[in-house]
Amino acid sequence: MGTELSLRRWSQRWRNMRAFVLTAGAVLCVLGGLLSSCNPLTRYATPTPTQVLPTHTPTNTPPPASTPTPEPTSTLPPTPTWTPTRTPAPTATATSVPSPSAVVKEDDTNLRQGPGKGYPVVKVLKQGASLTALERTADSQWFKVQVDGTDLIGWISATVVEIHFDATSIGVAKEIPPTPKSVATPSPTPGTGPGAVQGRIVWNGQPFPNVTVKLCSDWHMFGGCKGTEYQAVSGPDGRYSIAGVNPGKYSLVTKLPAQANESMWLGRSVELQAGQTLALRDLPVVKDDLQLASPTDKAIVPAKPTLAWEAYPGAAYYQVYVSSTTGKTAVSFEKATGTQYAFGTALEPGEYLWGVYAYNAARTKIAEAMRLRYFTVASP
């Protein structure tokens, strides 16, 4: 009886202790969040021997990696290479600037090595030969020129060429060839008594009759000849002969028929020795009957006037000259093929004088206006 009572009490204590343990474990599992591993039965149960069978562990072979399909790449257009563009500088409006040209007036004109008759002759030029002036002497009496279309350069006297430019527009020569040493030559036996002068007058390439030719020892622009004078008249072939001329130096003067004014030819002076007969080169004269049309003399004109003149028989072209009365050249012998010249640039206010010159196809001057005309550009 006592033993049974003791077993019951021991059993009751075991049950109470077991319940306590189970309850505490549950609480700990809840608190630890480890419900899956806190089975007290498993933990404290006696392990049952288990037969371990070989099991096939499937190999988790990853699927073949897919080769990523390249996404189309947006190809940018090539960046253009910047090439700097050279912007052309603004071109100034071309204005007509005459070249420093000149034309030989007569055949047998000498081109020399230096500015003077003491220099050797480089070339004998024909009438109409075209030249480009390069330099000049300080007095503008000689020009260093190049024969157009050639490499030939030499000096020529201003008296034997028609200059188509303002002489001051080219520079004075800095280097002048040394004057050649003169070689003594035997002096000719001096003649005695008066001499004679012969020559021929031509116009537009043809003999010109009935021209009065004079030799004057003292000629003045205003008043004419005031010294000793000799004269003759050209015949049908244009030839003249003046006899009985005393030795001395004379100006050569012509007066055309039906022309009021005489013309004294600069650079064509005549120096005659006693008893000498001197043959002169042909003299191409210029008529003064070219008619200017407009503007009329002393007219008031706009800043861009138009000059007009009458056509001249036998003229191939014309040259126009305009200068202010203060000496400033506005138009320097510019070529015109028609009978008008229009200004593209406005003239400054002031008074101007103008003239026109006619040339034939051989570039020889054949006519000019008898006198220059004036016009005035009024202030705006």
Image (tube, helix red, strand yellow):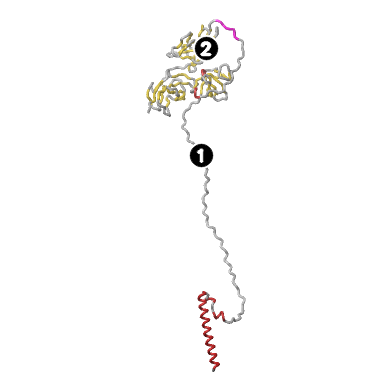
The answer to which of 76 and 298 lies nearer the viewer is 298
What residue is at 52 percent from the left and 12 percent from the top? 270
- To which quarter of the image does residue 277 belong? top right
What secondary structure is found at the residue carrying circle 2?
Answer: strand
**How far across and how far down the image is residue 252, in percent?**
49, 12
Query: Which circle marks residue 270 in the picture?
Result: 2
**How far across and how far down the image is residue 201, in percent?**
49, 14
**How far across and how far down the image is residue 248, in percent?**
52, 9
**How far across and how far down the image is residue 32, in percent?**
52, 74
Q: Name the dominant secondary structure of the magenta segment.
A: loop
Q: Which residue is mark 1?
A: 86
* Location of the N terminus (image quadrant): bottom right
Vertical placement of residue 319 versus 76, above or below: above
The answer to which of 325 and 252 lies nearer the viewer is 325
What residue is at 42 percent from the left and 18 percent from the top? 371
Specify the segment rendered in magenta. Answer: 187-192
